[in-house]
Image: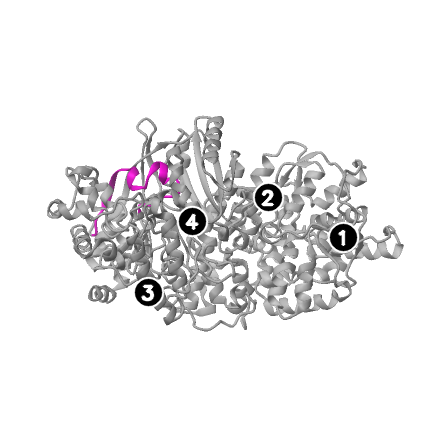
Amino acid sequence: MAEQRNAWRRSDTAALARELRGAVRGEVAFDAAARALMTMDASNYRRVPLGVVAPRDTEDVAAALAVCRTYGVPVVPRGGGTSIAGQATGTGVVLDFTRHMRAITELDPGTRTVVVQPGVVLDDLRAAAGVYGLTFGPDPSTHSRCTLGGMIGNNSCGSHSVAWGTTADNIYGLSVVRYGGEELRLGQGWQSDTPEGLRALVNGDLALLRTGFPELPRRISGYALDALLPENGVNVARAFCGSEGTLAVVSEATVRLVEAPRARALAVLGYAGESAAAEAAPALLPYGPLTVEGMAEDLVPENERRLLPRGSAWLFVEMGGDSPAEALSRAERLVKAAQALDGAVVTDAAGQRALWRVREDASGTATRMPDGSEAWPGWEDCAVPPARLGAYLRDFRSLLTEHGLRGTPYGHFGDGCIHVRIDFDLLSESGVRRFRAFSEEQAELVVAHGGSLSGEHGDGQARAELLPKMYGNELVALFGRFKDVWDPAGGMNPGVLARPARLDENLRFEVLPGHPVDVAFSYPHDGGDFSAAVRRCVGVAKCRTEQPAPGAGVMCPSFRATGDEQHSTRGRARLLHEMLAGEVVTDGWRSEEVREALDLCLSCKGCRSDCPVGVDMATYKAEFLHHHYRGRVRPAAHYAMGWLPVWLRAAAPFARVLRHASRVRPLAALVKRLGGIAPERDLPALAPGTFRSWWRARDRAGRQPSPASGAKAVVLWPDTFTDHLSPDVGRAAVRVLEAAGLRVTVPPRQLCCGLTYVSTGQLDRARAVMRRTLDGMERAAGLPVVVLEPSCAAALRTDLPELLPDDPGAAALASSVRTFAQALEEYAPHWRPPVIDRPVAGQTHCHQHAVLGDAAERRLRERAGLTGSLSGGCCGLAGNFGFERGHYDVSVACAEEQLLPSVRDAARGTELLADGFSCRTQLEQLAGRRARHLAEVLAEGLAEGRTEEPAEGPAPGSAPRPAEGP
C-alpha cells in the first residue's frame, strides 16, 4: 500500500486537476483552503487530500472515478463529514456530495419508497416524507446535517433503531459507481449487477459465512457478507451498506419509508446509576418503544437537570400512538412497569425537543470532562447484546480505571450500543501508547460479551485493525478478498476497514505545535492554549444545519447564508487547525485562506452557546485579525468602524450639521467609499445631543428624583451607541430604573467597553481602552453596572476579563454587569412594570443569547403584558459586519432568515422590540420599520400611566435572583 501511495503522490497533480475540470461539470478545487477543509471528519484522524470534487450528477461521479483511476489516485466519498472513525478522510480526491447531488427524485407514498441522491440531508428527507405521514426510520443525532450517502456508507442507526432498524434494514436498491467509472444497480438476488467473482467468493466460503457473525441488533463492524447467504436472500444492496466508501460510490438509493406515529409521548425514567438503567432497558422492549436511550448525569448541564426526574441516570423511552391519548396511555403504562426511582411523561412538542436536545448534544458535551479536560472518540459506539449491557458497563468502567482513564457512557441502551468519549492523552507518545493498549483490551472485552466493535459509526481507522479479535483471521482475510472483487485497483478509500492503517497512525493532533502559541486572549477554559481552543471543534457539525434551531438558536448564520463549508464554525476551526499545523495552510497568521473564511464570520458569538463544545469563533477571529494585520495597513473599515467611539466623540459637537450632511448623497457616498462601508447602506444619523449631555444638564438642573432611603444604587453604562446614536434609550432606561426605586448614577467620564476594537482585531488598542475604563470605574466598584446595549454587555462580561486576565478589576467589573431586565429583577423585585398589553415581534440580540441569557427579559415582558416571543438567529448587521463593503448580501440573507419574516408577519399593533442597536438599524434600513428597546416601551407605559396594583412579591430583604448565563 505504501508503494501505491508513493506512486500517486509522484503523479502530476496539476494535470490531474486539469483533467478533472475538463471531465466534470461540478466544482474541482485543489487549492489549500479546499484541501484543509477536508482533512478531518469527527474522528481523531487526519488525512490530507490532493483535491476536492463536488459532482453534479452520476455522470460527473463516473467521469471523476475514471480520471482518478487513470492517475492511480485514491477516492473517498464524503457526506456531512460527521463520521467518528476516520472513514470520511482521504489522501487522494474527496467527492463532496453536500453541494449538488441532493435531490429527492421520486417519493411514492403508496409503496412507501423514495429515491434519493447521496447528498440528501436526512432532515430534508424526513420533511418531504412527513407530508404523507411517513418518515425514514434511522435517525442519528446528526440528523440535521448527515446525508443519506454517509448513512449508507456507515450503516447508521440512531435512537429509533429498536423500532425501525439500521439503514441497511431500510434499503431496497442502490446505484453505485466503481473505481474507473462502471455503473452498477444493486438489489436482492444474483440477478442484480454484481462484480465478477462475487458469487464464487460467497459460494466458496458458505460455512465460514454461516458461523462467523455474531447475532445482535447493532453489528456494524466489518462487511455484512452474511447478507449474501442464500437463506438471507442474497441481498447485495444490504451487503454493500456499511462498506465505508471502500467498494464503490453510491449515486442513488431507493429506500423504505415507515409510518410515523401520529402522536408521541416521551417517558423519562430516573435510576440510581447507569448500570441500573442499562439492566432495566431490555425489560422495556416488549412494550413496543420507539426509542430506549440512556445517559448519566455527567453529560447533563447543570441548568438542564431541572428537566429530568430524580436519579443519577436516565432512560428516554419514546412511545407512539394514533392519538395523543393513546401515546400518553402507553407511556404511563410503561412508567408504572419500569420500576424506576422516578419517572415523568412529556407530551408537548417543545418539552420533548428540549429533552432530546440534551441527549443529542451529548455527542459534543461528552468531549469535555466535568473538570474541563478533553475527551476523544475512538471507542465511541461498541455494542453488546442488550441483556449483557449492565455487566458490560461494569467491566468497561473497571477497564477504564485500570488504565487511569475516564469516560461517560451514554447511548442506545435498548440496542446495547454505548457511546463514550474517553480522556485519552493523544498529544504525547506515552499517551498514544496507552490509547493503543486500552483499545486492544477494550476490543477483547467487547468480544467477550458477544458484542461488535462498532454498533453504529463503522470501523474506519479507529477499529478496523482490531477486527481479527472479533471475527478471526480467516474471516478478515475474506473481507480483503471481498474488497478486491469490487475494487481490484485498491483506489476506493484505502487504509479503511480492509487492510487498514494502524489505529494510532494519522492522529490529527500530532501536527499541532507542541507548545502554546503566543496569543492575546487568555482562553481560560483551554489553559491559555490557542491550539486547545481550536481542538474544541471535534466535527459534529451542528453549525452546518441549514435551518435555524428551534427557539433562539443562532449558530451559524453565515453558513446558512452561503452553504459553504468554509463559512461554518467547523470549517473555520479546520482552517485554523491547518494554519497551526503549517502543512496545507503554510502562511501562519498571514494566511489569506483563513482570513477569507473568517471574513464572513459575523462575530455573533452564537457558537459560544449553541456549539455543544463551546467553540468561540468570534474570539478566534479577533485573535487572528490581531496577528494577521500586526505591523500592516488594515482595511479601511477597521479604521472607520473599529475606531467608531473616537470618531463619534469628535463629531458630537457638530452632530446637527453632520446629520444634514449625511443626507447629501455625494458626500455620503464619499464617506462610505473612504470608510470601506457598503454603498447600499445608509449612514446612521447622529443624535442632536448625546445621552451624557442630557444627563449632565439634568444633573445641573437638579431634576433627579430623591431616592427612597436605602435605595439600591446602580451605574448606568453610557455605551457608545446609546450615547451618540440612540440617547432616547438611555433616557428611557433612567426613567424606568428610577420609577423602580433605584438610584441611578453615570460614570463621570466617557468610557468604552472596547467592543469595536475587539471585533476588528485591534486587541492592543482594545486593552488600552479597557484599562482606561477600569481606571474610570474605580469609584463605582461593587455597584451593579446596567448595560443597555447587549453587545457591549457581552464584551464587558467576556472579552474584558479574557484580555486582561491578571487585572482583578476586570473580573470584578465583568461580574457586576447586568442587562436592563436583570437589574430590575434583582434589585427592584417588588416593582411592577406598566401593563402594555400588546403582542411583540423582533429579535433577541445574538450576543444576549450567547453570553447573557434572556430569561429575565422574557419574564419582564410577560409581567408587562407583552405577549409572544422574539425571533432567534442574527439580524445580519452584527455591529460592523453588515456595514463593511462586500458583506451586504450575506447581511440581508441573515436578516431574511428569521427577523424580517417575523416582522412582516406581525399583526397590526404589534410592538417591535430589539434591544440591540444593530438589530434596530437593520430593521429600519431593510424593512422601514422602527423597533424599540424594551426600556423605551416601558417608559412610554409609565408616562401613559399604565400601572396596576403591586402583586405579592418577595419579602423585604429576600435574596435577589442571581444573574443568569446563556
Q: CA distance from mark 3 to mark 1?
A: 72 Å
Residue 818 among those drawn in magenta: no
Residue at coordinates 59% horizontally, 36% vertically from top-left?
904
- Label 3 SS: helix
Q: Are marks 3 and 2 in contact (CB under 8 Å)?
A: no
In which quadrant of the rendered view does residue 493 lie? bottom left
Query: Could you tell which of marks 2 and 4 lies nearer the N-terminus?
Result: 4
Amino acid type at mark 4: Ser
For mark 3, what is the residue? 437
**Residue nearer the viewer, 767 or 634:** 767
For disc 2, the marked residue is 926
Q: What crowding class fits label 4: few (fewer than 14 Cα within 10 Å), some (14-19), or many (20 or more)?
A: some
For the record, the magenta segment spans 155-179
| Of labels 2 and 4, the one closer to you | 4
N-terminal label among 3 and 2: 3
Residue annotated with mark 1: 688
Q: CA distance from mark 3 to mark 2?
A: 60 Å
Question: Residue 274's x, y, as percent?
Answer: 44, 49
**Residue identifier under label 4:** 275
Tell me the CA gap for discs 2 and 1.
24 Å
Location of residue 326 in the rendering, given as x and y in whole percent from the top left corner? 46, 27
Label 1–label 4 contact, CB within 8 A: no
Q: Identify the secondary structure beneath mark 2.
A: helix
Q: What's the amino acid at mark 1?
A: Pro
Which of the pair 12/602 is nearer the observer? 602
**SS state under label 1:** loop
Q: Residues within 10 Å of mark 3 (few under 14, many from 20)?
A: few
